[in-house]
Amino acid sequence: MAENEKSFEDKLVNMANVVDIIEKTFLTQITDIKITLAQKEYSEVCEFLKISKEEKCKISIGSINITFLKM
C-alpha cells in the first residue's frame, strides 16, 4: 500500500505543477478539470483521499477543482 500512496503523492505533485502552469498562463477564475480513471485507479485515489467510492472524488489545487471519474 505504501507504494500506491507514494505513487499517488508523486502524481499530486505533478498535478500541482500543471495547475501552476495553467494559472500563470491564462486563467483568471476557478476552473474545473475532469479526469476519467479505470476502476482500480479510481479506487486507489479515493482510498488515498479517504473518500467513499460512492461519493464524487474531488480535490482543489489553487483555483482548479479536479474531479476524478470512473470509467
Image (spheres, rainbow, N blue to C red):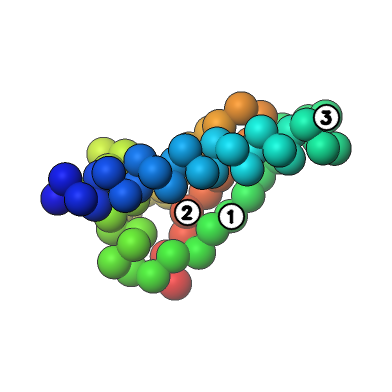
Q: Residue at x 31, y 49 (%)?
A: 7
In primary-sequence order, the first of circles 2 and 3 is 3
Is residue 46 visible from the viewing direction of this image? no
At label 2, counting other C-alpha atoms closer than 10 Å, the crowd grade (few under 14, some 14-19, many 20 or more) is some
Residues tagged 2 and 3 counted as in contact (Cβ below 8 A): no
Residues tagged 2 and 1 counted as in contact (Cβ below 8 A): yes
What is the secondary structure assignment of the residue under circle 1?
strand
- Residue that carries the numbered disc 2 in the rendered image: 68
- Of 41 and 50, the residue lying toward us: 41
Which residue lies most toward the left here? 1
- Residue that carries the numbered disc 3 in the rendered image: 28
Q: Residue at x 47, y 60 (%)?
A: 69
- The disc label shown at residue 34, or none: 1
Q: Which quadrant of the view contains residue 49?
A: top left
- The answer to whether residue 10 is above or below residue 4 is above
Q: Residue 31: image x %, image y %?
A: 71, 40
Q: Residue at x 58, y 55 (%)?
A: 34
Q: Quadrant of the C terminus?
A: bottom left
At label 3, counting other C-alpha atoms closer than 10 Å, the crowd grade (few under 14, some 14-19, many 20 or more) is few
Q: Amino acid at mark 1?
A: Lys
3D distance between C-alphas at marks 1 and 3: 19 Å
At label 1, counting other C-alpha atoms closer than 10 Å, the crowd grade (few under 14, some 14-19, many 20 or more) is few
- Of 17 and 35, the residue lying toward us: 17
In primary-sequence order, the first of circles 1 and 3 is 3
Q: Residue 53: image x %, image y %?
A: 29, 53
Is residue 42 visible from the viewing direction of this image? yes
- The answer to whether residue 29 is above or below residue 58 is above
